[in-house]
Amino acid sequence: MFFTQTKKLSLLLASITILTLSGCNNSSDKKAVVIVPPPAPTPIVYSYEVTLVNLTQGQPMSPAAVILHNGGQLWKIGESASTSLEKLAESGDNSAVLADTMVLAGQGGAGILLPGASETITLSISDTQPMMLSLAAMLVNTNDAFTGVNAMQLSNMAMGDKVSFTTSTYDAGTEQNSEMMATIPGPAAGGEGFNAERDDIDKVSMHAGIVSKDDGLMQSALTQAERFDNPTLMVTITRTK
Amino acid sequence: MKIKTLSTVTAFLFASSISAVNAQQLEITVTNLTQGLYYTPLLVSAHPANMSLYTLGQPATSALQMMAEGGDISGLSAMLTTANANSTENPASGLLAPAMSTTAMLTTTDGNNYLSLVAMLLPTNDGFVGLNSWKIPTEVGTYTFTLNAYDAGTEANDEMITGGGAPSVSGIPAAPGGDGGTGASGVTMTETNTNVHVHPGNLGDDDLSAGKSDLSNTVHRWLNPVARVSVKVM
């Protein structure tokens, strides 16, 4: 369609030129417009590079779940966490989030993202321009803390656009922050990951941070080395296709 | 005729936008938002895009280490001078006390379109407040944002006030508020994250003559953000 219109426009321009050159001669220029059939659509690929930097001093992060979607949210403050998010936040297992029905395309991180380390994850999707990007990763030396991005709008990102920002830390609200060895799956404790029981407030909120035994919580398996302040993750998103 | 007028206007717009980028007058106000931490002399600089004072998730340079461990900005300042940056140093004429503000004036020259600032936080081992390569807007106005506290990753946060401020010398140089302790055994002797990262905060304890830390857990803690910056582009 665009092709045809361009052609019309150039004919129009040509006729204006002729008019200008020859004065009031309006008898010529009644050519038929040639309809050019539109070319067969080639698949359009949308591609995003997501670079993560773990900004914490001593909280390794579980392999991130990065997803493209057009609706839904990974979490809502004040509402109960989904079981998929609970699994990610309590055990670091991203598979349920990546398999969620709202996911158009998803990609997991290559492995544990150590404190101070960086990783770039690439996501691609054909034919559908994704509206939103979300991601989540557990801070593994905690009971159920995670950081991430919730339903960030992507639709206004043009090719080559790049955005960079930092993210805060949330509490899934599905497991009490006892900090006891048996309840924390990270290397500082080596305890249990996912447990379906919900013995906390059962609402997602911001995380208050680690107390640690160095700060007087004697039952804690954690030390000052696992304490953190926000932000905990730097995210840079580049649209490459 | 019309075309000529249009191109003249375009040329004029082009020239004026270029000149706006060439030289900018900035008034930068920094507020220490903490209740119990002091800033060492600030380094505020407009510099080219191809350099930075620090990068999150990367090791600190030795110049950054000097600033973060001892408040010495001379190394970073020399680096900026080499890059033909426009810098201003120590606008507060000494330490910037908790909840106080200071204002720095800066005139930028061609290509110095990115603003950075740093100062060490006292009392910490290697904590600093930082702004990294903020793109200076060309539009006149006042732009306000907040900054976080970072850890240079170059020194374990033992929280012992020993006077140690030189690079690779352990300990905290001083607690300027006169509210630090002595006799601590040390919070930790190791720090596994040796890249620049978000500072976890001081731990402190409630014993100023012994315990693990020479810092007070009711005075020397903070939560991000630790600074508010207001940049007036004139």
Image (cartoon, helix red, strand yellow):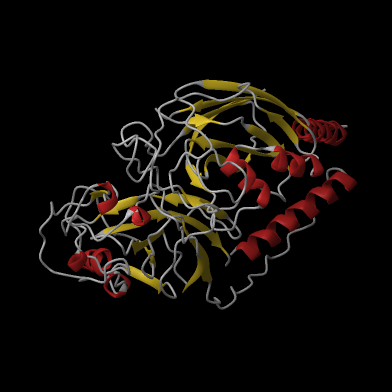
Quadrant of image for the C terminus of chain A = bottom right
Q: Identify the residue shown where x is 20% and y is 50%.
A: A217
Number of numbered discs overlaid on the protein picture: 0
Residue A46 in percent (x, y) is at: 51, 68
Q: On the picture, is A213 further left or further right than A176?
A: right
Locate residue B204: give its quadrant.
top left
Q: Is residue B214 above or below residue A229?
A: above
Camera-side residue of B209 and A154: B209
Residue A184 in percent (x, y) is at: 24, 65
Q: Is residue B65 above or below residue B40?
A: below
Q: Identify the residue shown where x is 80% and y is 54%.
A: A14
Asked if one can make out residue B178 in the rendered structure from this viewpoint, the answer is: yes
Q: Identify the residue shown where x is 79% and y is 33%.
A: B109
Residue B23 in percent (x, y) is at: 77, 30
Q: Identify the residue shown where x is 37% and y is 38%.
A: B223
Q: On the picture, is B7 further left or further right than A64?
A: right
Residue B24 in percent (x, y) is at: 73, 28
Camera-side residue of A80 and B227: B227
Quadrant of image for the N terminus of chain A = bottom right
Q: Is residue B61 above or below residue A100?
A: above
Locate residue B1: give its quadrant.
top right
